[in-house]
Image: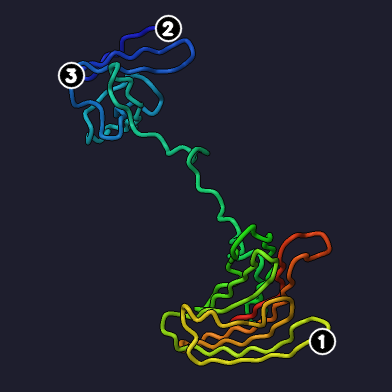
Amino acid sequence: MRRLIRTWPGVALVAVIVLATGGVAYATWGNGFIGPHGYINTCVPKRGGEVNVWKPGHRCTGGRVGLAFPANTQAGAKGPAGPAGPTGMTGATGATGATGPSNPSATTVDGETVTKLMLKIPTPASGTATVTLYGNDGLTVVAACDHTGTASVAANGPASADSELTVSGYQSGTTPTAFGSETDTLGPSSGAALGPAGSGESSFSYASSAGAVVTGEIGYQSATSFSSYAGCAFFGTATSG
């Protein structure tokens, strides 16, 4: 149904189209009839009848009640902002994963870190092959295997050369031989032996001037080690903290 509604004298005319679905659409000719919230303000009798359209701020009188309708403005005009939509999945921050261990061979117990030592060095064709077996708190333990398959272990300290190292153990053989040593000037190039070259077992204690303490036990075997491996083997633990 289409009907043109007449307004009171002195009031601007607005075309009102009543659609078959019951909806109402407004179009304005001129400026100033749409309020700041995107609505058109009207006054209508309580029992229905003529609709008067007023500019924003007008108060209905004479028993009329106010009605506000959303404006159907020209194409391209910006309507009122809608509510914010839900956060999309793209770019969402995932949950923080668990912190992995800094050293898979180390375990912390009662504030002390116990590190498992396990190393094999193939017998070199010539000279001597060296590999760092342990390094922490300024202490470096170096494992070596020469071209004859003879194993040896040595220790170096920090640049200050003001750290202490004590060593005790035994060298295996027909008649096992005990050994021991100590130094209070362990530095970066000390090469302090943790036992005689060959095969044996050594216990050591290390203390740096900064207060770091490391203790450990190392077994070392000359080639052939573990029955079939053609090389030197080193194994044990080091505890720091």
Which image quarter is the N terminus in? top left
Q: Residue at x 40, y 13 (%)?
A: 18
Most distant residue in the left direction: 10
Q: Residue at x 45, y 89 (%)?
A: 162
Q: Which residue is mark 1?
A: 175
Q: Which residue is mark 3?
A: 30
Q: Which residue is mark 2?
A: 1
Task: Please rate how many residues cluster around mark 1, counting C-alpha atoms within 10 Å: few if below 14, some from 14 to 19, many from 20.
Answer: few
Residue 69: give x, y in percent of width and height: 35, 26
Residue 187: give x, y in percent of width and height: 47, 82
N-term mark: 3 or 2: 2
Query: Label 2 sits on what residue type?
Result: Met
Q: Residue at x 74, y 76 (%)?
A: 199
Q: In this picture, is 99 found above or below 61?
A: below
Query: Label 1 sits on what residue type?
Result: Thr
Q: Of the residues tagged 3 and 2, which is closer to the observer?
A: 3
Residue 214: give x, y in percent of width and height: 59, 83
- Give the quadrant of residue 5: top left
Q: Real-space Cα distance between discs 3 and 2? A: 25 Å
Q: Of the residues tagged 3 and 1, which is closer to the observer?
A: 1
Question: Is residue 20 found left or right of 53 in the rendered image?
Answer: right
Which image quarter is the C terminus in? bottom right
Q: Secondary structure at mark 3?
A: loop
- Give the quadrant of residue 99: bottom right
Res. 42 in view: no
Q: Real-space Cα distance between discs 2 and 1? A: 119 Å
Task: Please rate how many residues cluster around mark 2, counting C-alpha atoms within 10 Å: few if below 14, some from 14 to 19, many from 20.
Answer: few
Q: Secondary structure at mark 2?
A: loop
Q: Secondary structure at mark 1?
A: loop
Pointer 2 with pointer 1, Cβ within 8 A: no
Pointer 3 with pointer 2, Cβ within 8 A: no
